[in-house]
Image (cartoon, grey):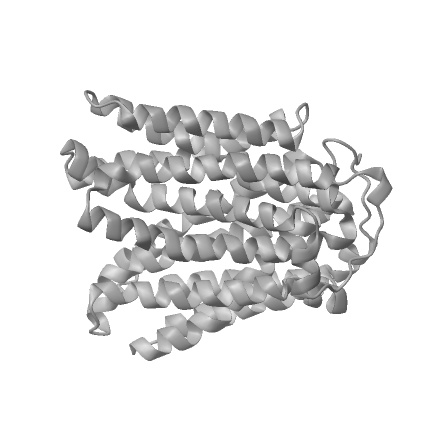
Amino acid sequence: MVSLLLVLIYICFISLGLPDSLLGSAWPVLHAEIDVPMSFAGFVSMTIFLGTILSSLFSNKLLVRFGAGKVTAVSTALTAAGLLGFSISSHFWMLILFAVPYGLGAGAIDAILNNYVALHYKAQHMSWLHCMWGVGAAISPYIMSFALINLNRWNYGYLIVSIIQAALSVVIFISLPLWKRAACVNCPGENGAADTDNTDEAPVSLSFKEIFAIKGAFSCFLLFFCYCALELTTSLWASSYLVRRWDFSPEKAAAFASMFYLGITFGRFINGFLAMRLSDRILIRLGLAIVSLGIIMLFVPFASTFALAGFVVIGLGCAPIYPCIIHMTPSVFGEKNSQAMIGVQMAFAYVGFLTMPPLFGLIADNISIALLPVFQVVFLVLMFIMHELVYRQRSN
């Protein structure tokens, strides 16, 4: 039963990644059809992010009251409803309206499933889980492309993904007995879900004041914020950096910049095997060291090849950091606190996604895009400090 449930969770994470690339894929056609400027995609994306932040913050209270299975099922249904709304939208205000349930559903799924896997499965599954998100995010542009080319409508791309999400929601509702019966049978310990002293502790509903009062919590939240700021800033500005810093053509730059996420996806696949032997703490340190190497390659002034390779290396280094921070949470902070902690971690992640890439955009416009590696170094150093502080504060 546990194996069947794990397969279902993997499918849930593929579905979580499916909508993430739809907006960007559809927007060149969509914005012209509803007659709004190209830049208005940012308002839709911001609304989605605000919904994910809100639902992440309250995921702990939802888990305590309803359980992981019910929250995941309802949240998946919410995303399906939001995507269905996108498919029938003919005005910009409709996109903003339906972005709300999509964001609320996506944030809750992300926080709940990350915590569930951190509690009940070995470390390698957390890395492979996030690999599955990459699979979903990679598939969705092809779904939108199929809709645009074969069905002549962007709406059908959203409709197809909405139907997939609705069907998955039904499957999750049917599988609710599995969620109740599943137990942590996957060898807890250094590479498992949690320390044996903390196993089988029931989650508790904590106020935000109580969460931030936990030793090491704020350092952990800042660690997550810095990681997500570095990841999305790199992803968003890599292509422009190659064009403006190294005079690549936009087409060639886009192709090479996409290798950053290929590095992350491949790295998480490999990290799953490394997690069988190494602890989360060691893997995070290893990831930070590899990111450092990649950023150093961006500083090389005389060869664009180093910049191209640097983005791939940064992606490989990023691969273990996100899943290992989540997976270490029950072990470091205790099972009963893990959902509260992970919910706030997700909120800090989305704040990093929401704020730091635009901030670097201002730096690039007003100073120079060549400062991208300097911007990355700031967050890399903060990540290293926060990571070490978490363990030091928890040991005192």
Along the line of sight, which residue is nearer the eye, 393 or 11? 393
Please tell me whether residue 368 is drawn above or below residue 45 in the rendered image: above
Q: Residue at x 36, y 67 (%)?
A: 44
Q: Position of residue 114 (x, y in %)?
A: 63, 50
Against 83, residue 348 (above or below) is above
Residue drawn at x 23%, y 60% as measured from the top left: 28
> What x and y, as percent, mark residue 378?
40, 39
Q: Residue at x 59, y 42 (%)?
A: 129
Residue 390 lies left or right of residue 254; in this view the side is right
Instruction: Please say if 162 is above or below 267.
Output: below
Tell me if 168 is positioned left or right of 254 in this view. right
Image coordinates of residue 96 in percent, x first then y, are 38, 74
Q: Quadrant of the C terminus?
A: top right
Pick whichever, 88 or 184, lies toward us. 184
Q: In the rendered image, is residue 154 in sight?
A: no
Residue 56 at least partly seen: yes
Is 225 left or right of 299, judged from the image as shown?
right
Instruction: Give the x, y percent position of residue 125.
Output: 64, 38
